[in-house]
Structure formats: structure tokens, C-alpha cells
Amino acid sequence: MGGFIGKNDDEYHNWTLANATIGRYPIPQMDGLDRMLPRGIQSALNEAMTDTPVVCLLGPRQCGKSTLARSLDPSRQYLSLDDVDLLAAATRDPKGFIAQWQGDITLDEIQRAPDLLLTIKRAVDENRRPGRFLLTGSANLLQLPHLPDSLAGRMECLYLHPLTEAEKSWNPGHFLSRWLVNDLSDKRLREDSLAPSSLPGRIVAGGYPEPQGRSPIRARQWHRQYLRSVIDRDVHDVALVRDSEEVARLLEMLAHQTGNLLNTSSLSNDLKLDRQTVERYITVLERLFLVRRLAPWHRNSAKRLIKTPKIHLVDSGLASSLSGISSGDWLKRRDKFGHLLESFVLQQLIAQAGWTDPDLRFWHSRDKDQVEVDVVLTRGSKVWGVEIKASATLHHSDGNGLRRLATQAGNDFQSGIIFYDGSSVLQLDGPKILAVPLKLLWEW
């Protein structure tokens, strides 16, 4: 573990407690953490490679894409376009660059040379061998404005997220799959009533492999250096941006607002930028997998288009560092932690959906009476709801949003759960609304 500076610091005490009680996984070498841990998406990736000529693994920088891609088949030729010489060769002569590699090839950071995709298309049309090209990208290729529309029907995209708590605990992450088939039977977890909650430490740690196990000060430093690197290296790959520092300032403001309704006008005033520029910068941050907009759900799909989305930072650790939240703020700044927890749980569910049910879609719900549901999941017409509470105590009113959602969805409502920091699965309003311990997300 990394050292910690500052002896009488409350944060040191909280960090020490968290590392003693979270049930940390074995970490012989922290810089190799993502090499040790199994990734839930790997089976889906292996399956795609058996029948699709071009497979693209997308996700934020430093989430483990290169490590996963290189672990699949050591015999594959691996080339990283972060190498300036390779990038220059690929940009100068895309056709010649691809022609010299006859076997299966992995191209890392493909967004840096998008013109290669037209050449890959021609190569695939001549030889549609499954698994021929494995691409990775730290920007969403499907949203890049200059991407040639060339690989329709030839490419499958999968998404790798920062480490989930299930992956960090060496568990397969089956919570979502069990919930969707109504297999959340009564279950009581082992509980030490005197043990501090592990939630603050997990939220602040986030999912990027590299800072795991570092002291809070060192982890925050890593997050800030990470952001600096992404802003300097990647922003101009995905959009024409006048000033990348403005993008960094916007992300820091969004970190303070994660889990809230997106107010573009307020951001525009605070940053002294016009609204269209703020909207464009948010799109840039989405393309780099740093933020996500969670669209509103409504029974009438047309009304979803005029309602306000929520904004979430993808990684709660990055959000915590940028907003100055530490695990010691769990009791003193519970309102801020509540929004961080919402982003944290949403990320766990979306990541699990990647290897459980890619057809799931995610929303939030807020009706005219301001009754909210933190996360709504849909598959076709079927609807599920999630409420997220930071406390270990529940009240009847905590289920109001799910009851309203059940009424609005009618027969399409499948079930709802209230995540809380407790230890038992409890029925609240019959079998369709349950209280579920947050730790089941990673302990199941």
C-alpha cells in the first residue's frame, strides 16, 4: 500500500478503517491490479470474436482495455496508436499500414487514426474472417463526427467500464441477472453492527485500477493527473475545441452536480460560456466516457424528448476527487454523498448490464409532482425501478417513487428495489417492491 502523509488527519483514520473493513482483495502489485482481476465483459468479448470480423472494445482511458485485449490471445499482433511513429505511419499511408499485417491484429486507441476504418472495411470485405480485427478506443467511435460510416454490419462494439465492486471482490457480478428473473429471495448477510460502513471508502475509491489501495491524498492526485492527461491528449481527437481548459472547468463543475438534473443555463452563466458551447463540451465529455446523461423516462415516449436529463460522472472516484469529497465527509455532507452514491450505483448496474443483458436501457423518472425514481430500467415495454438510500434505516415514504412508477407503468411494471446500507432483503409492498442491501451488488 502507498504511504500516507499527515499523522493526525481524520482522513488517515478513515482510510485505515476502510482498508481494514472493506474486505480488500489481495493486491501484491497495485500497478498490476487490472491484470489480476477477471473482467465480467470478457465472455461477451470472446463470443463476439467468434462470429464478427471487427470487434471494438470501448471505454475510458485507464480502465483496462489494453490489458484485457492483450490477454485474449498472446499470438495476436498488437499495435498501439499512442506510439507516435505507428500513428504517423497509419495516418500517412492507411492502406499500406493495414496491408503489411496478414494475421489477426489488435489496434489500440483507434480513435487517433479514424481514416484507418475505411481501409479496414476494404480488408474485411475481401476476407470476413471472424476476429480478424480487435480495436480499442478511449472515445466513443459511434459518436465521432468525422467517423466514416463504413463498418455497419461488420463491427460489434462492447463497452469496458472502470472496475465494478463485484470485479474488485473477485465475484462474477450476478446481482442484476438474478433480480431480472425475480430471484431476490429473502437473504440476510453477515453483519457486524459495530463495523463502520464500507460504502464511503468504495464510493471515494471509484473503479479506475491504478489508484486502488493508494492513500486518499495520492488517489486524488492520480485522478487530477488522469484528467489533465485526458484533456491534453484526447479532447482534440473527438472535437474541434477552442480551449480545452474550458472543458476541464466544466467537468469539475459537473462533479459537484453529479446525480442532479442537468441545468445547462446555470452552467453557462457560471462558466461565462454560451449555452451551445456548454452543450457541445458535455458531448465531448460523453464521447470520452467521463460523463453520461441519463434521459428521463415517461410512459409516453414522445414526452421523454422534452424533459430534463440527469448528469452523472461515470466514475465516483473521479467525481469525489474533483468535488473535494473524502470518506470522512460521510456524516457531515450526507447530501453530497447521496448524489455520489446514486452515480456509483448507476455505474455498477450499467456495467453489469454489459455482460448480463445489453438490451437494457437506463433512465430516471421525475413527474409533475416532483416524485422521483433514481434509476428506471426498461427492456421493451417492461419496467423496473431503483431507489438509492445512503442510510441503514428505511421509512415507508422511501418507496413513494416506486409506487408512483408502478402505477404509471401498469402491467409493464416488473419490480422495484430500494438499495440501502443494511443487511437484509425485505418486502415493503408485497413481492414487487423490496429493500435490498447495497452490498449485494458485489457480494452475491
Image: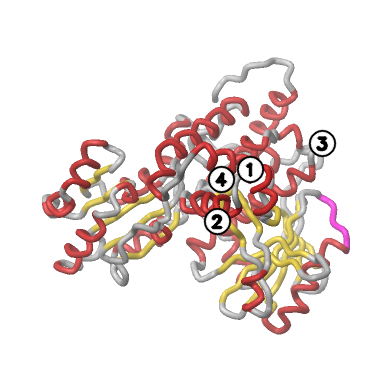
Sequence-wise, the earlier of marks 1 and 3 is 1
Q: Amino acid at mark 2?
A: Gly
Query: Would residue 202 be seen by someone viewing this image from the given angle?
Result: no
Q: Quote the CA–CA distance across marks 4 and 3.
A: 28 Å
Q: Position of residue 323 (x, y in %)?
A: 67, 37
Name the residue type under label 4.
Answer: Ser
Residue 318 pos. (x, y %): 58, 40
As drawn, the label of residue 332 is 3
Give, as a three-letter code, the residue at label 1: Lys
Give me the residue at 79% from left, 45% from top. 335
Q: Earlier in the sequence, mark 1 or mark 4?
A: 4
Q: CA distance from mark 1 to mark 4?
A: 44 Å
Type of amino acid at the residue the image marks with label 3: Lys
Residue at (77% x, 49% y) in the render: 390
Mark 1 is surrounded, within 10 Å at the Cα level, by few (under 14), some (14 to 19) or many (20 or more) other residues, namely few
Q: Nearer the viewer, residue 321 or 347?
A: 321
Q: CA distance from mark 2 to mark 4?
A: 9 Å
Q: Is residue 223 above or below residue 76?
A: above
- Residue 395 is one of the magenta-drawn residues: yes
Check disc 4 and report its element: helix, strand or loop.
loop
The residue furthest bottom is 411
The residue singled out by tag 1 in the image is 272
Q: Which residues are magenta?
A: 392-396
Question: So how many labels did they put on this image?
Answer: 4
Q: Residue under circle 4?
A: 169
Judged from this view, the residue extending furthest toward the right is 396
- Image quadrant in which the N terminus is located: top right
Residue highlighted by disc 2: 173
